[in-house]
Image: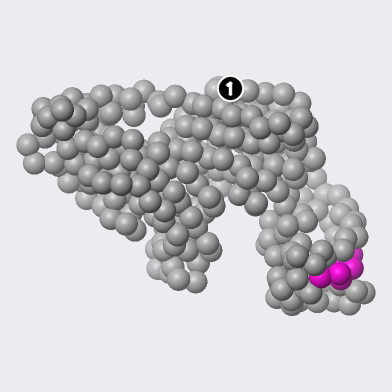
Amino acid sequence: MTDKIQQTLIIPDPLGGMRLDQALAIFLPQFSRTQIQEWIKSGNVTVNNKKWKARDTVLGGETVIIDAMRKAQPAWDAQPIDLNIIYEDEAVIIINKTAGMVVHPAAGNFENTLLNAVLHHAPSLQQLPRAGILHRLDKNTSGLLIIAKTHDSLQYLSRQLKNHKIIRIYQAIAFGVMTSGGTINEPISRHPIQRKRMAVIETGKEAITHYRVIERYRAYTRLKIQLETGRTHQIRVHMAYIRHPLLGDPVYGGRLQLPKGASHDLVQILRTFKRQALHASELSITHPITHKMMTWNAPLPEDMQKLIEVLKADAKDLDIFS
């Protein structure tokens, strides 16, 4: 789909001091900052009838005119793939994604993704950027995802996401016995050498993760984690950064360390659990139409439930719960 974007807006005073591209990203949350930067560079954006650069600073009160074309969306294939839809209405779809499913087509994964499945379920989503998928989960992370069904819903929910108003809560199992919760506020960017990995980098984008302890085991801790921002691999990178990588994480987890004296069952399950123990368990949004807060919960998948059972049984042998 290619269509015209024509919009005139006034930069409000509270945004004074921001870069032009940052300020426009607030007004146009349905478009990526990269897309906005391309429009500015191509001269499709004027400020007080003049062409500015993306890095120029707004003061507040400027008149911005946008006259651009929306980038064409790829015509992804619709495929009849089962989806666990836990809620749907005219504005949103809430899906409980299984571990092992890629969310969006990319190099090496053009088919059998959640996007392909969603287009089969609701073909009209072909008209929306990313088929209305508001955010992503890693391939081997399970749990709740939001999909917007209309342009208005996508814009409304995108604004909530940018303003950190969508509540996303995860359950995870991390290596090490953690004594208390905390907050990790460390910027994340792409690893300078290993380009498929992310890392804590001083010049990266702001990334904030809150965590608290649910349960402790022999050498692991079950956590409740809440995202304030949503960087790629954020939870996995942050937990590895504080030396408590997620159990089973094939990228950031490091070499498997078996607890001394662990039961046979625990050793077996640790050796065969080949994904990060991470599940998006709770999601809350302000509904785009009713403007009421709605919350959904997804129970832990079977593999994590079994893992926790074995961890608990092994911890009981040490009287950790006594």
Image position of 212 with respect to 59: above or below: above
Q: Nearer the viewer, residue 295 or 138?
A: 295
Image position of 214 with respect to 29: above or below: above
Model colouring? one colour
Image quadrant in which the N terminus is located: top right
**Residue 63 part of the magenta-drawn span:** yes
Image quadrant in which the C terminus is located: top left
Q: Amino acid at mark 1?
A: Ile
Let me know if residue 231 appears in the view: yes
* Percent position of residue 234, x then y: 46, 52
Residue 137 lies left or right of residue 261; in this view the side is right
Q: Residue under circle 1? A: 86
Q: Which residues are magenta?
A: 60-65
**Residue 80 part of the magenta-drawn span:** no
* Percent position of residue 62, x then y: 86, 71
Which residue occupies the extreme left position in the image? 261
Let me know if residue 141 appears in the view: no
